[in-house]
Amino acid sequence: MQTIRVAILGMRRLGGSFGLALRRYNQSKTARQQFEVTAYDPDDRLTVRASAIGACDQIARSIGAAAADKAIVILALPYHEVEAAYQLIGRDLRAGTVLLDTAPFKQPSGAWAKKYCTSEVYPVGITPIVNARYLFDGLDDLDHAAEDYFDKGVMLVSPGADADRDAVQLASDLAAMLGAAPRFTDPAEHDSWTAVVEALPALIGVAAFESISGQDHWDDLRRVANPAFGQ
């Protein structure tokens, strides 16, 4: 049985769930290949924890070591770390690597891939729309990663106009292995959706907080704030 070497860069809930879902696939009776997962996170404690819960087979102490000689690299870092990750790994990825980028905005990632990666690396944007049971809990830590995080969800696959067809097919096949249905979008369409469902609510939340925190009775209000306000 073929073994496919995978790196997951970023070990919070999303990255951990990728690892656990791949482990579940490896253990299934229908598995046609095995995925060997290497985990990396800037916080070494998260990679140690990922290993302990079974979200990876091995850990790497540097992002370059994690990504080197892998068939698939899943980029699941916070958005403000994504460009730096491209800079650090882009030229060292082996020829034929499929780079699956979960960043919330795909057009900037596409530009970074062209800037920092060789033409023999194949980037494809992906966005998991997760299992509805996890939609409202507001948690993002590794301890809440789950092997069924993607079950009955959707995987938005957002290839650039010049994306490699085999890489796009791999992203689609991987989505199905994880329990999600692939749906194809172009990067511009994807980013317009993200602006509405993520950036706009965040902006409204900031504006509301700014307004409320300036009121005379803010000291009283903050004493009764619960998780809904915190999120």
Image (cartoon, rainbow, N blue to C red):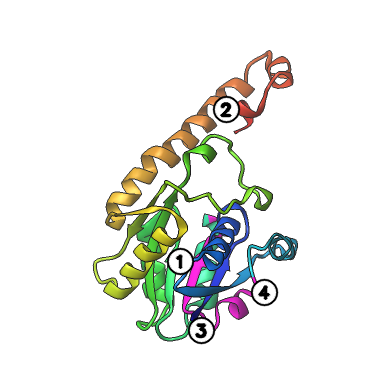
The amino acid marked with disc number 2 is Glu
Q: Earlier in the sequence, mark 2 or mark 1?
A: 1
**Cβ atoms at labels 3 and 2 below 8 Å apart:** no
Gap in angstroms between the C-alphas marked 2 and 4 = 44 Å
Q: Which residue is drawn at 48% across and 44% down?
A: 131
What is the distance, in whole Å, between disc 3 and disc 2 at their CAs? 44 Å
**Residue drawn at the location 62% of the way across and 60% of the way down:** 11
**Residue under circle 1?**
30
> Between tags 3 and 2, which lies in front?
3
- Residue appearing at x 36%, y 74% in the figure: 114
Whether residue 194 appears in magenta in the rendering, the answer is no
Residue type at mark 4 is: Gln
Q: Which amino acid is tagged 3?
A: Asp
The answer to whether mark 1 and mark 4 are in CB contact below 8 A is no
Which is in the foreground here, disc 4 or disc 3? 4
- The picture places residue 170, in percent across and down from the top left corner, at 36, 70
Amino acid residing under circle 1: Thr
Nearest to N terminus: mark 2 or mark 4: 4
Residue 73 lies in the magenta-colored region: yes
> Mark 2: few, some, or many residues within 10 Å (few <14, many ≥20)?
few
* Distance between the alpha carbons at the discs numbered 1 and 4: 24 Å
- For label 1, the SS is loop
* Image quarter of residue 66: bottom right
Which is more foreground, mark 1 or mark 4?
A: 1
Compared to 175, does 95 lie above or below?
below
Q: State whether residue 102 appears in this view.
A: no
**Dot 3, how many residues are within 10 Å of its Cα: few (below 14), some (14-19), or many (20+)?**
some
Question: In the rendered image, which residue does mark 4 sit on?
Answer: 58
